[in-house]
Image: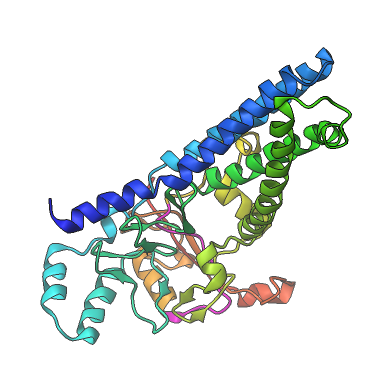
Amino acid sequence: MAPHHVLRCCQRSLSWIPVIFINLVVGWSYYAYVVELCILTIPNNAEKISYLVVFHLFFIMFIWSYWKTICSRPANPSKEFCLPKVEKERYEKEEHPDTQQEILKKVAVGLPVYTRTGTGAVRYCDNCLVIKPDRCHHCSTCDMCVLKMDHHCPWVNNCVGFSNYKFFVLFLAYSMLYCAFIAATVLQYFIKFWTNQLPDTHAKFHVLFLFFVAAMFFISILSLFSYHLWLVGKNRTTIEAFRAPVFRNGPDKNGFSLGFSRNMAEVFGDQKKYWMFPIYTSQGDGNSFVTRLVNLDPEQIAVGLQINGKSSVDGPASPKHVLGDTINHIEDHQDGSFDKTDVAETVTVTIESES
């Protein structure tokens, strides 16, 4: 086996260490709470049963969402974003970057791609050999392009992106509730053991340490969960929060924001009864996204009209390209407000896909 493959195998094996650590801590917390606290320490049966019922509810939801985040394979760009064979050969033979960009621009005309690099070039991955869809990035750890990539999380040994972002947010929420419930219910027995109101038994160490661990994890997860909840409300990824996506008319940190309710629905779905369960309900296909641009790019309007085949005044047209969701580009004010005089100045271009 080549040294490169051996090194890669070692890296993949070592990457599971954080996951194993989390599972060991969770396994110990289960034993400490259920056995050492509830069974061996709490004398009141009613209190014991109520604690166990609520604890197992949080525990199940926490483990469910955690392993859904781990096991969900990152979503990759669809085949439509791969260069056709002829264009691919031309691109690989071409040595001049400007000519390569012309090849990419020609292919990208029929794709719902509206973001660019910082220099205005079409975003192309030389490793995966695909034109990157909007919000897609190449993960060096996973060695693949990930749709709507947020970040690579070592604690789940997986990329957090379009396919599992809802699971990741729920994992943070339920782990926070899990820790909060443990800390709140253990507190009175922590004080009793600390002040020697209870006899020194082997349960003392578990109860004292359990409170410290639960409180520490709760504080750290609370800040992370709050941050990602803010990102969901703004419809941004962690990457976009640090570096605003660049559209053809320039960077726009709010380019994908559609308002709080629609932003939430894009991640959690439009049926609120499923929001709290780690089952896939996110909207779209990850290859294209509804965008709201502050200033419309005339080139986007021309492309949109060309793809639709008709102008909006001619009524519905048969779409020429099958890809993704409806993409709306709406001229808007910086503060998102509208009045009656704005209606005449608003331009809407829609690229519809076949069902």
* Residue closer to the observer: 5 or 305: 5
Q: Which residue is at 30% across, 58% downward?
A: 143
How far from the left and from the top, in percent, is residue 17? Answer: 43, 46
Which quarter shows the C terminus?
A: top left
* Residue closer to the observer: 74 or 345: 74
Q: How many marks?
A: 0
* Residue closer to the observer: 140 or 307: 140
How far from the left and from the top, in percent, is residue 303? Answer: 37, 72
Residue 69 in view:
no
* Residue closer to the observer: 198 or 74: 198
Q: Which residue is at 45% across, 58% downward?
A: 148
Q: Is residue 318 left or right of residue 218?
A: left
Quadrant of residue 96 in the image?
bottom left
Q: Is residue 213 left or right of residue 352?
A: right
Magenta stretch: includes residue 57: no
Most extreme residue toward the top is: 45
Quadrant of residue 254 in the image?
bottom right
Most extreme residue toward the front is: 200
Q: Which residues are magenta?
A: 286-298
Q: Is residue 242 above or below residue 17?
A: below
Magenta stretch, main secondary structure, is loop
How far from the left and from the top, in percent, is residue 301? Answer: 44, 74
Q: Is residue 134 above or below residue 160?
A: below
Q: Is residue 232 above or below residue 268?
A: below
